[in-house]
Image (cartoon, grey):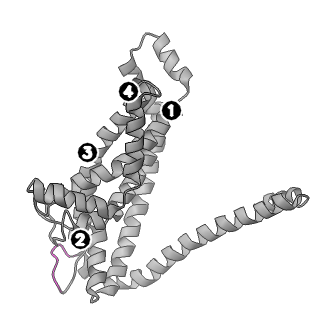
Amino acid sequence: MMKHLSEQWTSYRQHPGATAAWFFIHLAALLSSGVVLFLILYILVRGIPNLTPDLFAWEYNAQNVSMLPAIFNTLYMTVLTLLIAIPIGVGAAIYLVEYARPGSRLVKVIRVTNETLSGIPSIIYGLFGFLAGVLFLGMGYSILAGVLTLSIMVLPVIIRTTEEALLAVPVSYKEGSFGLGAGRLRTIFRILLPTAIPGILSGIILATGRIVGETAALIYTSGTGTTATGNLLHPARTLAVHMYCLMSEGLYTDQAYATAVVLLAMVILINALSKILARRLMANGG
């Protein structure tokens, strides 16, 4: 590593502009890595000492402020959201890449709409979910209202990453499939999608991270219910909302830091499992 950096520095030293660019690029990389490392260490130092068995009791009360119901609700809502968003997002990307006429007005409208949705603040999604789901459709504060709102939020990420993954598949794969007599639908499901799995999974990982860490949209839709429930019409809080509630009350700051440790561990675990799954799918496909 040091030898490689030394060789780069020697080659760039002869050009002042290249030297400055080399310096700022490496400085930016170090700063970004340092910030992430500092945040992780800060959360671990503040949170690990406050992890107690009471925080993992099945029932929440004012004495233990247990996070276990919130963990269950987080996993439950994440799975439901992905079950809705993945088929719609992947299907939309397949349409844009394989079926839509390139440069058509409809494709432009879809892409502009998708990019606009990706830039809308989560609080706006929360207000929309509150007006449309909680009030207009009569769902009340419920898991279903939160799941539908989250599904709309993560659709742009899944559509965009899936579209890029499909476009990255070599054209020769598709031409070879057509040459062997396979139809378009068979080619999509047997050739294109398996090859694009790593890119699709990266979008799903990003979507999962947004679901797990979302607070603003869920406060207005799924509410802050403290029980672990599988009833779609009952209110429930996720782990991120649970942490927000503990911090906003000002009485359980230490428990909030402990919740942050568990939330961080959950995100890392989901990312690791997704990467393992991607490797196995690639190995089976190869």
Q: Nearer the viewer, residue 248 or 226?
A: 248
Q: Nearer the viewer, residue 96 or 280?
A: 96
Considering the image in quadrants, where does the N terminus appear?
A: bottom right
Nearest to the eye among marks 3 and 2: give it: 3
Q: Which residue is mark 4?
A: 189
Question: Which numbered disc covers residue 68?
Answer: 2
Q: Which residue is mark 3?
A: 84
Mark 2–mark 1 Cα distance, whole angstroms, equals 42 Å
Nearest to the eye among marks 4 and 1: give it: 1
Residue type beneath disc 3: Ile
Q: Is residue 270 left or right of residue 84?
A: right
Say what secondary structure mark 1 lies in: helix
Residue type beneath disc 2: Leu
Locate residue 253, reporting x and y percent.
33, 86
Say what secondary structure mark 4 lies in: helix
Mark 4–mark 2 Cα distance, whole angstroms, equals 39 Å
The image quarter in which residue 231 lies: bottom left
Say what secondary structure mark 2 lies in: helix
35 lies above or below 83: below
What residue span does the magenta drawing correspond to? 57-62
Looking at marks 3 and 1 on the same chain, the residue that comes earlier in the sequence is marked by 3
From where the camera sits, is residue 158 visible? Answer: no
Nearest to the eye among marks 2 and 1: give it: 1
Mark 3–mark 2 Cα distance, whole angstroms, equals 25 Å
Residue type beneath disc 1: Leu
Looking at marks 4 and 1 on the same chain, the residue that comes earlier in the sequence is marked by 1
From where the camera sits, is residue 35 visible? Answer: yes
Nearest to the eye among marks 4 and 3: give it: 3
Nearest to the eye among marks 4 and 2: give it: 4
Check if residue 22 falls in the magenta segment: no
Question: Which numbered disc covers residue 167?
Answer: 1
Mark 3–mark 1 Cα distance, whole angstroms, equals 23 Å
